[in-house]
Image (spheres, helix red, strand yellow):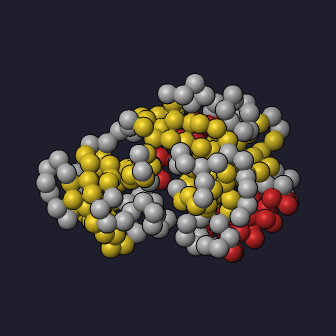
């Protein structure tokens, strides 16, 4: 572990697999290597396209589902990219973000008084409402796994929901609250972050409007090794 890294949490995994196909955004078909079982349906807990990670023959890490009544008995945890494992399960994003917000020496918001999850704002339910002294800070979390030329890009698919969240944060600023977005970047091969204008112009322009309105954006770099998530650093932004 590098000196600057901080261990966030242990996720673990139970089996290695090989990706075959993705019939819909919630399901992947895989071959499980340890058991030799083929064409097994596993749950994909990530709405992104993940085209540079989920392709035929690529390596995967799976975790057994805890609900015995579920149709899919496995959860997709990570996908291989060169020599790295990339977390591709957004079910862990809120816990990771809450860990960040609870660490004043790491969190871009500094020391806070309280953190309330799943709070309603306008027509949306945002990830956190943070209280810091007499300030209220609305915080939304987005996961990022797409990289081009050492630049992490969000989103990797058009996101009407993501655009709506930015519009709600702009409204929060107009109402006198503070607002921030934490981009959780799960790639070690990056140097910068940028909104993905080519993929979703609507999100890009809402990003620009939100930044002009005073919404703060923090791309946070994480890695996944030996079943553990590590926080590395805050990435600089470099729009492309």
Identity of the residue drawn at 45% across and 41% down: 224
Identity of the residue drawn at 33% across and 73% down: 23
Identity of the residue drawn at 80% across and 49% down: 178
Give coordinates of residue 55: x percent, y percent.
36, 65
Q: Is residue 112 left or right of residue 97?
A: right
* Residue 46 visible to an observer of this rendering: yes
Direction top: furthest residue:
3
Picture quadrant of residue 173: bottom right
Identify which residue, 35 or 121, lies in the foreground: 35
Direction left: furthest residue:
36
Identify which residue, 55 or 49, lies in the foreground: 55
Picture quadrant of residue 194: bottom right
Identify which residue, 137 or 219, lies in the foreground: 219
Identify which residue, 234 or 171, lies in the foreground: 234
Picture quadrant of residue 135: top right
Q: Is residue 38 left or right of residue 179?
A: left
Q: Is residue 115 left or right of residue 29?
A: right
Give coordinates of residue 19: x percent, y percent.
30, 61
Q: Is residue 226 above or below residue 163?
A: above
Identity of the residue drawn at 83% across and 38% down: 134
Quarter of the rendering occupied by the C terminus = bottom right
* Residue 164 visible to an observer of this rendering: no
Give coordinates of residue 169: x percent, y percent.
74, 59
Give coordinates of residue 100: x percent, y percent.
61, 37
């Amino acid at each position: 572990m590098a000196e600057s890294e901080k261990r966030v949490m242990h996720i673990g995994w139970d089996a290695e697999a090989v990706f075959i196909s993705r019939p819909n955004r919630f399901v992947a078909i895989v071959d499980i290597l340890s058991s030799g079982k083929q064409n097994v349906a596993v749950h994909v807990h990530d709405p992104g396209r993940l085209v540079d990670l989920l392709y035929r023959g690529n390596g995967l890490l799976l975790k057994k589902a805890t609900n015995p009544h579920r149709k899919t008995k496995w959860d997709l945890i990570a996908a291989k990219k060169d020599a790295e494992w990339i977390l591709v399960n957004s079910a862990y994003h809120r816990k990771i973000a809450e860990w960040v917000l609870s660490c004043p020496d790491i969190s871009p918001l500094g020391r806070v008084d309280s953190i309330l999850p799943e709070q309603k704002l306008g027509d949306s339910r945002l990830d956190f409402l943070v209280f810091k002294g007499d300030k209220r800070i609305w915080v939304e979390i987005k996961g990022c796994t797409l990289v081009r030329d050492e630049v992490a890009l969000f989103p990797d698919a058009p996101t009407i929901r993501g655009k709506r969240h930015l519009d709600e944060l702009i409204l929060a600023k107009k109402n006198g609250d503070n607002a921030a977005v934490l981009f959780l970047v799960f790639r070690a091969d990056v140097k910068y972050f940028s909104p993905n204008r080519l993929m979703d112009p609507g999100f890009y322009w809402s990003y620009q409007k939100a930044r002009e309105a005073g919404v703060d954006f923090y791309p946070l770099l994480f890695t996944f090794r030996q079943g553990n998530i590590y926080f590395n650093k805050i990435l600089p932004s470099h729009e492309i």
